[in-house]
Amino acid sequence: MLKKDIIEKILDVGLSTGGDFSEIFVEDKTNTGISLIGGKIEHTISGRDYGIGIRIFDGFFSVYAYTNSVNEKDLIETARKASAAIRKVKNRSVKDFSTQIIDGTISPIEIYPGTVSKNRKIDIMKRAYHAASTYDNIITQVTVNYLDSHQKIMIANSEGVCKEDERIRTRLAIQAIASLNGEMQSGYFGPGSGKGFEFFEGLDVEWYGKEASRIAKTMINAEYSPSGKMPVVIDNGFGGVIFHEACGHGL
């Protein structure tokens, strides 16, 4: 994603004012999002995010700068501006490194989402919508969201590490609303995976749609939980979690 000699120059500039560690994070990410409400496409969006972040450490102190330019001069200038926050004598050098690409055979991608038409993606969404909306008359609204992302990254640092990785993610999020006597409850199911579009080929989309509606129906017909003063037993080491849930979110 970046040439080795450019990376070395950027990292070296990062250490030029006395920092003890510098690193680069490069990201090139494409996203697709489609929303279906009430059987109709509400909106669809596709985008690309690209950027390069440069971080420099001096002990516990850190400086971060970023740019979306791949021009060598711009990158070096960004590193220089970041390093200007540290005013010491240079005492570290960039170690030699070789780029290592993460083995993609661990989780091979069969169908890249970017090669699939939006019509095929919408067909998957409509199948989930139909299954959820026809589950029971108590279901009054169904929303289906489709998401996929293709992210390429590079991480390099002054310790000689330089690695590249590719991350593919897909997800189908289904929400069903059940209504009864002025009350509404929701059910949700969101199957997803670090796979390509092949994930949906073996997925029982109808089952997930029905399951979201089943949860909503169960919630709307459920009795209220008993209330009142009750004993609470808190195991050693678990008190912080209880405090967080009871008070932390409110704070």
Image (cartoon, grey):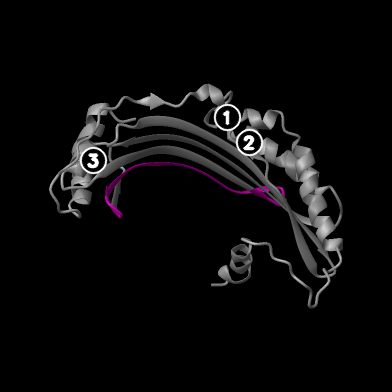
154 versus 19 height, above or below: above
Expressed as whole percent of the image width and height from the top left, the position of residue 134 reads: 83, 47
Expressed as whole percent of the image width and height from the top left, the position of residue 147 reads: 58, 42
Q: Secondary structure at mark 1?
A: loop
Which residue is at the front of the view, 21 or 162? 21
Residue at 78% across, 78% down: 229
Q: Secondary structure at mark 2?
A: helix
User: Which residue range is magenta in the image?
Assistant: 36-61
> Marks 3 and 2: in contact by CB < 8 Å?
no
154 versus 230 height, above or below: above
Which residue is at the front of the view, 250 or 212? 250
Front of the two marks 1 and 3: 3
Q: Secondary structure at mark 3?
A: helix
> Marks 2 and 1: in contact by CB < 8 Å?
yes
- Tag 2: Cα neighbours inside 10 Å, few (<14), some, or many (≥20)? some
Q: Of marks 1 and 3, which one's residue comes earlier in the chain?
A: 3
Distance between the Cα atoms at labels 1 and 2? 7 Å
The three-letter amino acid code for the residue at tag 1 is Val
Rendered-image quadrant of the N terminus: top left
Q: Of marks 1 and 2, which one's residue comes earlier in the chain?
A: 1
Residue at 31% across, 24% down: 98
What residue does disc 3 label? 75
Which residue is at the front of the view, 199 or 155? 155
What residue does disc 1 label? 116
The outermost residue toward the left is: 89
What residue does disc 2 label? 121
Whether 91 is among the magenta residues is no
Q: Main secondary structure of the magenta part?
A: strand
